[in-house]
């Protein structure tokens, strides 16, 4: 892919704009899954427009591979447990105290109810569940490594062939 971003501690987000090279988004998901397994990793590959949706489905969803269509995040996340809101443990505790157990139950609440009981953090969590994730992919910058290779015709048994090759650079 043209860009990637690490998702600590166990994930990586990829830019899926090159999906057409693999027969579309489903083909890209299959290719990433196959590459991860070939490298010895057990992978859960999710393609989604929002970073929260991809992470939540990869960590808490039932499927090991999934593609979420744009605008389909709320429906895809509905059955997931509240634990998928990993960054908001206080909100999760408050929602459990209210008797809620899934992200879908949070999604259907009125925003005024959420604000009055959970404040701005609760409203932010509800936005994530509804597919309104403001986070964007920030591509990792890899250090540029410059290498030069010289191949000698025969094994160097003295220093002269090596010095000759180094002078040519």
Image (tube, rainbow, N blue to C red):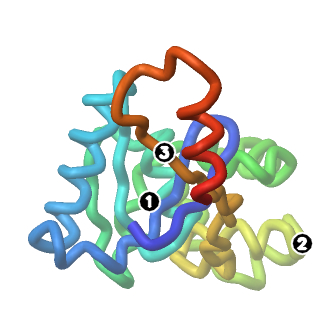
Helix, strand or loop for disc 2: helix
- Residue at image coords 51%, 15%: 157
Q: Are marks 3 and 1 in contact (CB under 8 Å)?
A: no
- First in residue order: circle 3 vs circle 2: 2
Quadrant of residue 106 within the rendered picture? bottom right
Residue 80 in the image, given as x and y percentages of width and height: 46, 48
What distance separates the C-alpha of mark 2 from that of mark 1?
22 Å
Mark 3 or mark 2, whichever is nearer to me: 3
- First in residue order: circle 3 vs circle 1: 1
What distance separates the C-alpha of mark 3 from that of mark 1?
55 Å
- In the depicted view, which residue is nearer to us: 50 or 86? 50
- In the depicted view, which residue is nearer to us: 161 or 43? 161
Say above or below: 113 vs 79.
below
Q: Quadrant of the C terminus?
A: bottom right
- Quick one: label 3, few (<14), some, or many (20+) residues within 10 Å? few
- To which residue does mark 1 refer? 77
- To which residue does mark 3 refer? 150
Residue 89 in the image, given as x and y percentages of width and height: 81, 45
């Amino acid at each position: 892919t043209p860009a990637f971003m690490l998702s600590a501690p166990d994930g990586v987000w990829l830019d899926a704009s090159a999906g057409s090279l693999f027969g579309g988004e489903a083909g890209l998901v299959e290719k990433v899954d196959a590459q991860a397994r070939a490298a010895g990793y057990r992978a859960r590959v999710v393609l989604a427009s929002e970073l929260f949706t991809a992470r939540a489905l990869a960590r808490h969803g039932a499927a090991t591979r999934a593609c979420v269509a744009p605008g389909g995040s709320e429906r895809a996340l509905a059955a997931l447990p509240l634990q998928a809101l990993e960054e908001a443990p206080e909100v999760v505790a408050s929602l459990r105290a209210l008797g809620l157990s899934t992200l879908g139950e949070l999604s259907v609440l009125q925003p005024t109810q959420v604000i009055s009981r959970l404040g701005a953090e609760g409203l932010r969590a509800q936005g994530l569940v509804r597919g309104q994730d403001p986070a964007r992919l920030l591509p990792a910058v890899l250090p540029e490594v410059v290498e030069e290779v010289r191949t000698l015709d025969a094994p160097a048994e003295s220093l002269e062939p090596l010095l000759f090759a180094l002078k040519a650079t």
